[in-house]
Every structure is written in structure tokens, then in C-alpha cells.
Amino acid sequence: MITVDFNRLPIRPGYRVLDVGCGSGRHTCAVSRLKEVVAIGLDINPDDVIEAKNRLIYEERLGEQGGGVWGTIVADIAHMPFKDNSFDLVICSEVLEHIHDQETATCEAVRVLKAGKDLVVSVPRRLPERICWALSDDYQNANNGHIRIYKKKELTGLLENAGTRKWADHFAHSLHTPYWWLKCLVGPTRNDSALVNLYHSFLVWDMMKHKWITRFLDRLLNPLLGKSVVLYLRKRKNVKGDYTPRSSVSSF
């Protein structure tokens, strides 16, 4: 499930791209398929990083990558081991809703980004997320601890205070919203619901087949039911205000 719309981004050969909170590597793998880029996946969970690495190795063996370089690293978003201005693009997808110190996390993401380059951030959208919280008391903990719900304006302010300017946004994954509502109704940790499993099979089929009808429905319903809000921001060349760069101890 790819949340970032890469068609909006001017990614060129030689670009260094960091996927912060990469999880199992969905966006890292997508970046590695682009022509001659450096794709780095970072996550605090070692098991997730191992899974991302294995996926990248598998795609490399299949010849599905774009001829660039990739790597994975276990690290905390609040203390990333990269020099200032190391990357041409930073992706932070479905991460900030888990982070207690969101200010430090966003400042770190901006610190390692080159001036004039792009940061893409996605989080669960306010209304679908609120419904999930209302339907199930266990939902937050079942998803590795969702500790807050963002308003788009609030998230934009947080990221712009860190030294960026938003230039685009959109909603994504409307077809996934009913799936999470169903999971919350039956219990988010249950695996024996026939209806939930059937819907999950449909989503997997959709991700594998990319049929035009489901892609059309997803785009049509995103303004109303999109599960995620995605912001595209550019690091200011002369950063002032609340942004305070952190020093880093090692280089990429």
C-alpha cells in the first residue's frame, strides 16, 4: 500500500531518499524501483528493519529495482545518525501518530533534508481515526500505540514551524477505511472474523491487480473517506523561528 504519490515529486537519478519509520519497507521498496536513486529505510523496530531488508533483497534478485543503491538502519527518528542536509527527499508515512516528542521528530526529519527539497508526511485522517477510536477502546494499542489524532491544520503548523512550507496535500486509501471500521467493531486483534478476512482479501487483490474500477472508486471516495492525509512540504532555504537543528554524531 503506497501512500506517497511519487508522480508529484521531482525525483532524479542520484537522489538520496530517506524513508523514516519504514516499517516493512513499502515505501523504501517503491523508491528503490526508481531510476538510480539511493533508498534508505530507517526504523526503531529491528524486526521491521529485517523484514524491509529481506523485501529489498528479494526485489533485487527479481531485477525489479532501478539500478541504484539501498540500505536499512535501526535508529530512532528523534536521534538519526546522519549529517545535516543529507537527503533530497524524506518520507515519514504513518509515524508521527506514534511519537510522544513530535517536535523533536519533525525537526530531525527537516534537519537531515537539504534546503529546497521535499518532505512528505502522512498520518491517519481525523474523522476516520476518531470513528475507529469510538468503536474500539483497544484500537490505539492494537496499532502500536496511536497516541494522538491530528487535524490537518495542526499537522501543517507543526511541520512548517520545523522549517518547511506546504505546497500540496491529498487524502489516500478510502477503500481501507471501512476495513478498519469493521476490525474495530469485531475487535482489532481478532483474526477469525469471516467478514473482516474477506474484506482483507479484497484489499490484497486490489493492491496486486490495480484494476481501474477500484482505482477509480478509491480516487472518487478519497475526499470523503480517505484513511490518510498526505502533506507535501519543502524545506525553506532560510529557516527561522522555532526550528532548532540538532547536531549529529555520524555521517551518511
Image (tube, helix red, strand yellow):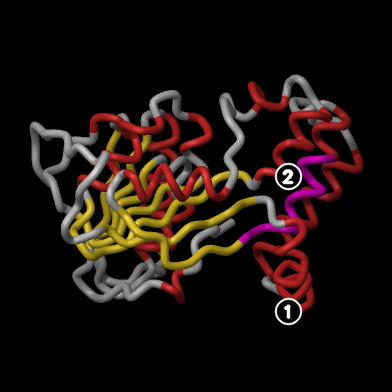
Disc ID at residue 127: 2
Q: Magenta residues, as a range? A: 171-181
Overall secondary structure of the magenta section = helix
Q: Amino acid at mark 2?
A: Leu
Which residue shows up at 27% across the image and 55% down it?
70
**Is residue 246 part of the magenta span, yes or no?**
no
Please tell me whether mark 2 sits on a helix, a strand or a loop.
helix
Between 14 and 153, which is closer to the camera in this rendering?
Answer: 153
Amino acid type at image mark 1: Trp
Nearer-the-camera pick, 224 or 188: 224
Tell me what residue is drawn at x 16 percent, y 34 percent: 246
Where residue 10 sits, quadrant-wise, is bottom left
- Residue 51, position in %: x, y? 44, 40
Callout 1 crowding tier (Cα within 10 Å): few <14, some 14–19, many ≥20 = few
Which quadrant of the figure contains the N terminus? bottom right
Point out the frontmost of discs 1 and 2.
Answer: 2
Q: Which residue is mark 1?
A: 212
Left or right: 110 in relation to 43 = left
Q: Residue at x 38, y 37 (%)?
A: 49
